Image (cartoon, rainbow, N blue to C red):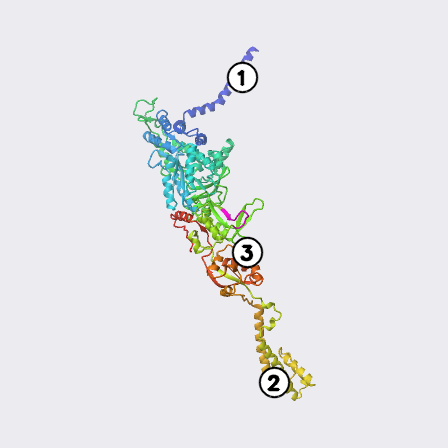
Amino acid sequence: MTTMSRSSTLAIFSCIVVLVLNSGGPAMAAEGDLSRKERVKVGLLLDSNATMGRIASSYINTALSDFYEAHPSYRTRLSLHFRNPQNDVVLVASAALDLMQNEEVHAIIGPAYSSQAKFVIDLGIKAQVPIISFSATSPSLSPTQSRYFVRTAYDDCSQVKAIAALIQAFGWREIVPIYEDTDYGNGLIPYLTDAFQNIDTRVPYRSAIHPTAQDIDILKELNKVMTMPTRVFLVHMTATLGSRLFVLANEAGMLNEESVWIVTDGLSSLLDPVGSTAMSSMQGVVGVRPYVPMSKRLKKFMEKQLNTSPGISTFNGTETVNLFSLWAYDTIWALAKVAEKQWTSSDQLRYVRPSTNRKMAALNFSDTGTSEMGPKLLQGIINLSFHGLSGLFEMVHGQLQPSGFEIINVLGNEEKIIGYWTSKHGLSKTLSNRTEENREYYSTSMDDLKPILWPGKTQKEPKGWVMPPLKDTKMKISVPFKTGFSEFFKIHWDQRTGVPSYSGFSYDMFIAVMDALPFYMPYEIVPFMNASRQSAGTYDEMLYQIKLQKVDIVVGDVIVVANRSNYVDFTLPYSESGVSMVVAIKDDERRNMWIFLRPLSWALWLTIGLSFVLTSLIVCFLEGRHQNEDFGGSRSEQLSTSLWFSFSTLVFAHREKVVNNRTRLVLAVWIFLLLIITQSYTASLASLLTVEQLQPQYVDVQELVRKHYHVGYQKGSYVREFLVRDLGFDESRLIPLNSAEEYHEALSNGIGNGGVAAIYEETPFIKLFLGKYCNKYMMVGPRYRNDGFAFDLMCQCTSTVRHFHGGHPSSRTSRGRS
């Protein structure tokens, strides 16, 4: 039993060992295969403390895993050597030198910023190690000038035309760049300035802010910018400094309805990593960023990342990584492809050094050695072409080229795409429609963009320029307080809050002028009234408030008069005008019941009556002599029959026959006369009944003056002075009136019942009055012309506006005539 037990135990143990060995065989073999893979050392310079560095590092590791999972049979493997130099140029250079001397890397990915890349590129040239950056986008770094520098991203210059097209679409004539005072920020400014110059847009000031600036320093610079009239700002910064800038600008109230804020792709491609606080401070900001086509591979990758890393940032309105992470991912794939293609033997993976020491404990800038694999990796990546997550990965002059740009609008916690820009077609709402239509024109119209919600949560396009304040922060605009003729200007008072609102033709004209101005002018409307809500004086007194510098502009139904131009300036008139006289119409005779007698004169009526009687007597006499039975009977019967016969011939209804030829001759003359009289009477009566007979009661001005009749005028108007000075009316015979209703009452009463004989008024008001009472009154006499309605402003306002327009020939202002 014991022997059998031992034998059984030994057999079972042997089986278990065999099973374990068999199950572990493939894994061990795989490990053995991996150990035989040639490792190509690649340096990685990223600041893990920065948001972009953390995200990029994560997706570099993901790219490495995905690539070799898709290509398990490749003979080479990228071996990443990570260094965290933080945001320090010296530490970056030291870390790069360490990677070359001690790790003997054959390529370096990074550094993150353009200012750090300059010295590292020089080291790369010395060691023949390609420096591959997916985030150093400054034009100050040029792959054509630095052979060992490869930019697996877009040059910042590529977005300049898209930004210029956006500025040109809205017609902004001045712009202030606010940029980072580093190589990244300074490198783009000359290209922006040239592009703006080509579209006649001035750059009156450049605001440079260093990344090390404190919040108080940034606020001082923002306050300096706010003292200038320009309100279009272009922000070109990295996410770290840009997020601080927008938080401070929003707290300072600079993101309002007057301003326009545009960000370059340095911020627009990293909007979410700036943080929720900065995003909430960027509401209404417009940005330009490269367009990334949504391929099946990218969509699948996003779904995978969403499942493995919920809560990641947004890009293109979909859950995914930002653009720089896509470039980092594609950079790893490109480098891995090239390493496999260029590797032939292990001898390539070494450094050639002049010194006998392979590795040195102390860094030596004069003895970096040279990589044999580096030049082959450089040549391979330059000639490589494949479709990555970010689109077509193909080097043109050592860097990627964009297919187009997206125009975005920050709304809430996301970026709404409002349009696209391509070098062939310019701006468009969608790329697909423009491609399908195959249009050949280049568009710079804002109509080719979707609606934008600007800062201040308004869809009204900002002017981009504000009027420099004369004394206070807002222009004071005085408006007339009047009770009549509200069609031109009316003040509405809210019964609950007491806040006034305004309407009328003059007000609408003013708003239209403000909308047409190429700049924004803040203003405050001040009604010209006293504490009891009554008019504070005449129009001349209201205009004189400009001379006293109590107000800046007067808006309303104000007439351009010569003496007023001595202390105010007028705009061009927006309405033709002139002083005329309105009088009542004489009573309409159509309402007279005896109007049917009017077509013929009384003498003619008498002549017709006598002819009628005479014709009857002649007919009676002639037909009686011939014993005509139709005219028989007694004398009275004969006479009555003759009268009826003559009367019935008016309508040719007579039945009696005549037998005497002389009677026929008399009747021929009589009927011909009746025909002429009937036709004339019918025509005259029809004319009296259908055509209005307007006859004014007064037409002569001198008659009104001579007879000392009362004359009305609009209260507060300059017409009173005109009647006394120019027409010679007695001042005591002038009656001030306020409204069209009072005009009607005064003219209806007439001179005998406390009314007026006529009213002198401006033509626009007369037209309104006659529009209500057209059948009772009419405008007569000569028109005394003036220059019409206009707005009035102080001379300093005019000179300021002219100074602004002096640099822009397309705009102009004019002074009103006197």
The mark nearer the N terminus, 3 or 1, is 1
Type of amino acid at the residue the image marks with label 3: Ser
Q: Front-most of 720 and 177? A: 720
Q: Is residue 716 left or right of residue 97?
A: right
The magenta segment is 525-535
Secondary structure at numbered mark 2? helix
Residue 478 visible at all = yes
Q: Where's the N terminus, which quadrant? A: top right
CB atoms at circles 3 and 2 under 8 Å apart?
no
Q: Which residue is mark 3?
A: 739
Check residue 527 for magenta coloring: yes
**Mark 2 residue crowding within 10 angstroms, few (<14) / some (14–19) / many (20+):** some
Q: Which residue is mark 2?
A: 664
Q: Which is more foreground, mark 1 or mark 2?
A: 2
Q: Residue at x 60, y 78 (%)?
A: 606
Type of amino acid at the residue the image marks with label 2: Arg
